[in-house]
Each structure stands twice: as structure tokens, then as C-alpha cells.
Image (cartoon, rainbow, N blue to C red):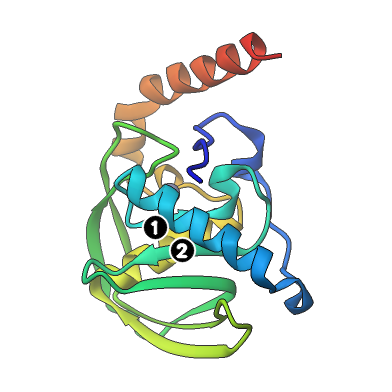
Amino acid sequence: MVYEIKKYGENILKQIAKEVDPSEIDDEFRKFLDDMVETMYETDGIGLAAPQIGVSKRIFVCDDGNGVVRKIINPIVVPLTEETQEFEEGCLSVPGIYKKVERPKRVMIKYLNENGEEIEEIAENLLAVVVQHENDHLDGILFVEKISPMAKRLIAKKLANMKKETKRIKEENE
Ligand SMILES: [Zn+2]
């Protein structure tokens, strides 16, 4: 099942998502994770966080670009270096906008996988970008809040219009 992506202007994208109780991780939950992966591929994303499909829980899925899919529950992300990298990011919830974001180059990520097992991994390069971008979604933060002030000014109007459009569609559907 492919979910509809919540767009910029939706309140849920600004909320802090709730921890998953490990006892929730059952077959039905794993089906939900599979649907998240399906939605991510269908929309050509390399990462998708649960709030982006309207579920305010600390879950995201990602593909590191090598076809390895991770289903990540209750992540804790810790930078391992002060060295940063700049990467042009985009977001399924903020369509049509691509801007450079500076983030730590290497992070440690601790999480529960789809079987409830505790995993600890080091993420570098593109995977580090995706993991941090998706983890931000769980704290209600979008990449457009992390770009340079200059870039922010350049997209301010686009974002304002996107917000209006999201509101209009929402009102139409009510
Ligand atoms: Zn995103």
C-alpha cells in the first residue's frame, strides 16, 4: 500500500513524534514498515519518516543507495566527528526544492530493527545524510530550516505558496 505524502504546511511535520513501544512490533507493524518502504520507492525517495505519511511515531525507512533497506525504530543519532559535509538535499514533503545542508560526515545510529533487535551502526557519507535528515523529521524539523540564511530568503516565497496550497487542499477535503 502506498501512502499519501504530507506536504509542507501540515502540522504533523512540525510535531515531535512518539517513541514506539517495543511490544508494538508485530506482524501488523512489519506490514506497516513494508508499506513505508513501498511508499518511499513509489515516490522515488531514499528515505521516508512516519510523520510524512501522517503517523507521529519515531520510525523511518531508508535506502543507502546500494539497495540496502533499513527499517529504523526509536533511533538515537550521535555525531562522531566535527568534520561536516555539504549535500544538496530534497524532501518528499517539500517537493521541488533542493538546497545544500551542512551536517556531520559520520554519525552513530542506535535503533530497533523490524524484529525489535537493538542495532548499532556507523553511518557515513550519503547514509549519514539520510539518517540525519530522517531523524530530524521525528523531531519536527525540515531540511529547509537548516539551510543558509541566503538560501532561506531565496525560497521563502515558494515555501509560503506551498503552505497556502497545502491549506487550500486540506480545506477542500474537509
Ligand atoms: Zn524529508
**In contact (CB < 8 Å): disc 1 and disc 2:** yes
The residue positioned 34% from the left and 51% from the top of the image is 41
Q: Front-most of 57 and 16?
A: 57
Q: Is residue 100 visible?
A: yes
Q: Is 150 located above or below residue 77 in the figure? A: above
The residue positioned 36% from the left and 35% from the top of the image is 152
Residue 151 found in image quarter: top left
The residue identified by callout 2 is: 61
The residue identified by callout 1 is: 47
Residue 23 found in image quarter: bottom right
For the residue labelled by badge 2, is the local secondary structure a helix, a strand or a loop? Answer: strand
Numbered circle sitting on residue 26: none
The residue positioned 39% from the left and 57% from the top of the image is 47
Q: Position of residue 7 (x, y in %)?
A: 50, 32
For the residue labelled by badge 1, is the local secondary structure a helix, a strand or a loop? Answer: strand
The CB of the residue at mark 1 lies under 8 Å from ligand 1: yes
Quadrant including the C terminus: top right
Q: Front-most of 39 and 131?
A: 39
Q: Is residue 104 visible?
A: no
Q: Front-most of 172 and 10?
A: 172
Q: Position of residue 33 (x, y in %)?
A: 54, 62
Q: Distance of mark 1 from mark 2, alpha carbons?
A: 6 Å
Q: Front-most of 95 and 86?
A: 95
Q: Is 153 located above or below residue 126 in the figure? A: above
Q: Position of residue 164 (x, y in %)?
A: 53, 15
Which of pointers 1 and 2 lies earlier in the amino acid sequence? 1
